[in-house]
Image: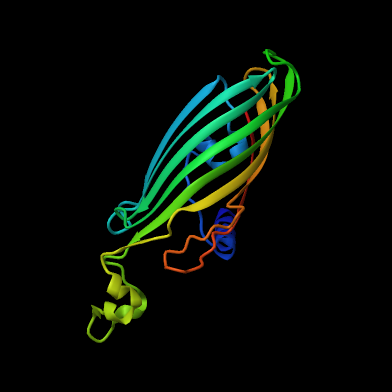
Amino acid sequence: MKYLLSILCTVFICLSSNGQDAQFSQFFNTSAYNNAATTGVFSGNDRVVIAYRDQWSSIVDGGGFKTFMASYDHKIWFGSNTLTLGALVLRDQVASDQFSQTLAQFNIAYNLQLSGSKYQKNGFSQYLSAGFNAGLGQYNLKSRDIWFGNQYDIPNAIIDQSIDALEARVGETLSSGFYPDFGLGLMYYALMGKYNSVYAGASLQHVNNPNISLIDNGNTVQESKWSINAGGE
């Protein structure tokens, strides 16, 4: 049964996936990156997060995925409600910086208490959080040593880069330029005592479908992405 489920999941991913943003295994520690509505959803008034991943370095020639993210949130209280301002930077690179993404993002979220009190330690309290993020991103591709299947000369077993238009740009860095990027998020959560909670939320990223083409006058649209998250403790 478990093998059948694995096959079905693999087929589903292959049929529905067009691409993805940088992902962290411990996604619950990078919540502000995944959903703007989680900005400010933490105990205390300030939060600093630093995350790093190094993935598939032994498989991908020249190094795998290396991703660094840092974020900071600060709460402003309005009675039992909070307005939280945050900032986030991300650097994602593949194969020793051959292909990279840089992102700087500003987050803002309002956390509304639906029931309970600010200083309630036990009992039941509910919250609704809405968030928005705006940022600037850039993709870069170093064209040195990059080749494609149609450039492989089978009879002579060599790579002929003169076949492709990129041949004239070997060694040059292709860039998307800075593009604006916007996202929205919404989350509901409830606290039931000091150590018990449930939550559910959704976010929509890249709502403006930015043009991330690496080619001059090109048009490569970054599709919008829905994320749904739920859990409990």
Q: Is residue 165 above or below residue 128?
A: below
Q: Residue drawn 63% across and 20% down?
A: 77
- The quadrant holding residue 81 is top right
Residue 186 relative to residue 106: left or right = right
- The quadrant holding residue 215 is bottom left
Q: Residue drawn 37% across and 57% down?
A: 140
- The quadrant holding residue 70 is top left
Residue 75 versus residue 15: which sits nearer the camera? 75
| Image quadrant where one finds the C terminus | top right
Q: Is residue 40 visible?
A: no
Q: Is residue 133 visible?
A: yes
- Colouring rule applied to residues: rainbow
Q: Is residue 150 above or below residue 193?
A: below
Give how far across and how far down residue 153 sits, in percent: 28, 83
Find the residue positioned furthest to the bottom. Answer: 155
Give how far across and how far down residue 11 sits, in percent: 57, 63
Residue 117 relative to residue 177: left or right = right
Residue 22 versus residue 220: which sits nearer the camera? 220
Give how far across and how far down residue 88 sits, in percent: 47, 38
Q: Residue drawn 57% across and 41% down?
A: 133
Q: Is residue 162 above or below residue 226?
A: below
